[in-house]
């Protein structure tokens, strides 16, 4: 089955971050990685711009400076089978 794309690869990151934060009225607090802004980061293997499906396997999430590791990364998730 083909991988369908609604948005060009170079546009989805700003749409999911800066533009989304501005849209909901919190662009002055989050939406970018800069000192003084809230930040939540995820780590994936490889470059998600080369394939959006890489975001389905998150290795860890960092929220407010705390790292939360995904014990299912690289393996099969029991709920999804992927």
Image: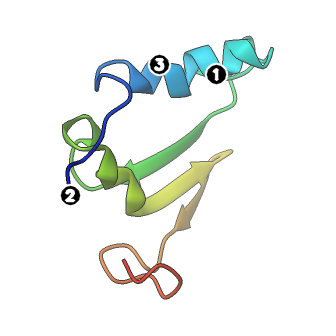
Discs 2/3, front? 2
Disc 2/disc 1 C-alpha distance (Å):
30 Å
Could you tell which of marks 2 and 3 lies nearer the N-terminus? Answer: 2
The residue labelled by disc 1 is: 20
Secondary structure state at the residue bearing disc 1: helix
Could you tell which of marks 2 and 1 lies nearer the N-terminus? Answer: 2
Secondary structure state at the residue bearing disc 2: loop
Residue 37, horizontal then vertical, whole percent: 68, 22
- Residue 1 is tagged as 2
- Horizontal side of 49 relative to 11 (left or right) equals left
Discs 2/1, front? 2
Disc 2/disc 3 C-alpha distance (Å):
27 Å
Q: Looking at this view, name the residue that lies furthest to the front.
A: 1
Secondary structure state at the residue bearing disc 3: helix
The residue labelled by disc 3 is: 14
Residue 35, horizontal then vertical, whole percent: 61, 20
Q: How crowded is the residue under tag 1: few (<14 C-alpha within 10 Å), some, or many (20+)?
A: some
């Amino acid at each position: 089955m083909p991988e369908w794309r609604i948005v060009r690869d170079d546009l989805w990151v700003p749409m999911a971050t800066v533009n989304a934060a501005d849209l909901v009225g919190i662009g002055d607090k989050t939406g970018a990685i800069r000192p003084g802004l809230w930040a939540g980061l995820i780590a994936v293997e490889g470059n998600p711009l080369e394939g959006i499906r890489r975001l389905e396997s998150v290795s860890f999430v960092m929220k407010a400076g705390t790292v939360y590791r995904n014990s299912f990364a690289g393996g099969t998730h029991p709920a999804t089978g992927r």
